[in-house]
Image (cartoon, rainbow, N blue to C red):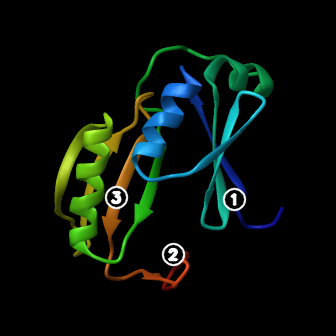
Amino acid sequence: MEQRVSLITLGVADVAAARAFYEKLGWQGNEVEETVFFQAGGLGVVLWGREKLAADGNVEDPGGDGFGGVALAHNVRSREQVDEIVAVAEAAGATITKRPAETFYGGYAGYFTDLDGHVWEVAHNPGFTLAEDGSLQLPF
């Protein structure tokens, strides 16, 4: 198996509401067969009905929202961008779980959850380089 991720699929309660939320963040999606696809750098983020996703993967869905042990991260080039993006997310209906603040690694980050409880971190990490296209270049 090659070391890469191609798609991140988020199981959502209401595909139309989730799409509207992400479009308020400035994302542009395309819907195909009740599934919304967003190009996110070199990978795709997909919104699909939570029940359909669970059935497709043949997994039990405990239902409800809650922390599932996964956080999606959006790294940016400055602390100011962290503040701006968290503010836009809040205006779009996100729940801010941690206001932007200094981090233990010398960076600056905040957290929010989308309408379905998916956790997003918005971070500026001075130790990570972002290429012109936004792709992350790890230093090790």
In this view, the mark in front (2 or 1): 2
Q: Residues within 10 Å of mark 1 (few under 14, many from 20)?
A: few
Residue depicted at 70% across the width and 26% down the height? 53
Mark pair 1, 3: CA separation: 19 Å
Q: Residues within 10 Å of mark 2 (few under 14, many from 20)?
A: some
Residue depicted at 62% across the width and 22% down the height? 50
**Mark 1 or mark 3: whose residue is earlier in sequence:** 1
The spot of residue 72 in percent (x, y) is: 47, 51
SS for callout 3: strand
Q: Amino acid at mark 1?
A: Val
Disc number placed over residue 5 in the picture, else none? 1
Q: Which residue is mark 2?
A: 134
Q: Amino acid at mark 3?
A: Val
The spot of residue 1 in percent (x, y) is: 84, 61
Pick the front one: 2 or 43: 43
SS for callout 1: loop
Q: Quadrant of residue 90?
A: top left
SS for callout 2: loop
Disc number placed over residue 105 in the picture, else none? none
Q: Looking at the image, do the residues carrying marks 1 and 3 touch, with CB atoms under 8 Å apart?
A: no
In the displayed structure image, the side of residue 58 where residue 90 appears, left or right: left
